[in-house]
Amino acid sequence: MSTLRWTTAGESHGAALVGIVEGVPAGLALSIERVDGELARRQGGYGRGGRMKLERDRIELLSGTRGGITLGSPIAFVIRNNDAVIEKLPVPTNPRPGHADLAGCQKFGHRDPRAVLERASARETATRVACAGIARQVLEHFGIEVFGHVVELGGVAIPATAIDAAFALSSAKRHELREKSAFFALDAATDEQLKALVDATKEKGDTLGGIFEVRALGLPPGLGGYASGAERLTARLGAALLSIPAMKGVEFGLGFATARVPGSLAHDAIQAARDTSSGSRYERATNRAGGLEGGMTTGEPLVVRTAMKPIPTLRRGLPTVEFETLEPTAATYQRSDVTSVPAASVVGEAMVALELTAAFLEKFGGDSLAEVEDAVGAYRRRLGGV
Ligand code: EPS
């Protein structure tokens, strides 16, 4: 079976987070360090709070490999929670605005926000990053890079010129640049300004949202599909990104700005490819579409940006009411991040990687990596005749 499927389980302060990835072809040398590296990255970024000092996320592989090579069977893993105190934590007496607390309690008919928030917590995204860390190694085997970075935080934007310059660099240099940034951004000069902003916001007991961008480089044309809504990669990527807690909007390429320009400035001219090493005889003169047309990859870089709301847990709790009395009160506060937009960029990168791996294996999937290699090679050759 070559269709990628994945699922997660676990509560934020339960014993562990659990993940299963199915559909990874047999014969892939799986790097656990690669997965743990992404987990460590997700824990980082300037503005994280106390919880991340307690956790050291890493996967314990339970199945699906032998001698480090995938078997084609389900790959199961756990990530243990150090802060596994779910049975000892108090039950908040009021629902926190901006969280799943109230609608979740109404949905299940109880007054115990902990029964909701333990699973609704963004802690679950660690499992997604691990699932993607496994699955994306298929894409990486074929030279496809998925790269997330923060482009805006609390209204301060990374200059577009710095981003363009970073994407003109080699992949290794671009990664180096991002690693140096406390915000997983591509401009060292903006880091200091962002640090000052986060510090001042922390002082005030407030929080910050922002925008991250994910680009995927080296994609072949024709992933996804136009024949049904469910195949359209635009919809699938949008849903994948909006499934991350706290995400409020997604745009591709020119995004919302496309709606404000005439058609002559909204699209990408087709021209003969200067470099035909990918197999395609065509390229686009620009990439306003962000690498997708008709719900399919065009072969140009995928460019997608996602907006994240500020974390709703504030030191001075937002106004709410007590469950029992409906008396006005301030929402319960224990601890919180000032911002987790850098971490969200790691999660967004993971979600895009998962969706692209799924689309890639739908088109080229086989039981073994060798079969996938054959299918990719044959497609590249066929593209030369189109
Ligand atoms: C989260 C609240 C905080 C964050 C957590 C998400 O956790 P705690 O309630 O333990 O202080 O640290 O994020 C993570 C644990 C993580 O791994 O990203 C929330 O309410 O969503």
Image: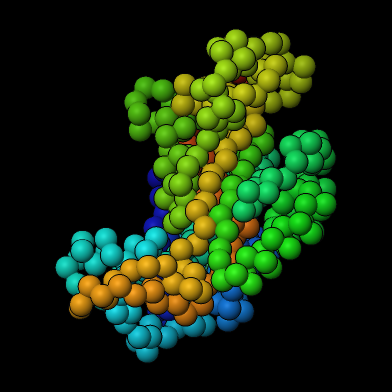
In the rendered picture of this protein, how many numbered marks are placed on residues?
Answer: 0
Residue 282 point in image, percent of width and height: 66, 15
Vertical side of 269 occupied by 79: above or below:
below
Residue 141 point in image, percent of width and height: 65, 45
Residue 31 point in image, percent of width and height: 64, 60
Q: In which quadrant will I find the C terminus?
A: top right
Vertical side of 40 occupied by 231: above or below:
above
Identify the residue at image location x=53%, y=35%: 251
Whether residue 356 can be seen here: yes
Identify the residue at image location x=49%, y=58%: 128
Residue 131 point in image, percent of width and height: 50, 57
Q: Which corner quadrant of the image does residue 39 belong to?
A: bottom right
Q: Which corner quadrant of the image does residue 18 belong to?
A: bottom left
In front: 314, or 124?
A: 314
Q: Is residue 330 left or right of residue 373?
A: left
Q: Which corner quadrant of the image does residue 76 belong to?
A: bottom left
Identify the residue at image location x=64%, y=52%: 153
Q: In which quadrant will I find the N terminus?
A: top left
Which residue appears farthest toward the left when viewing the image?
109
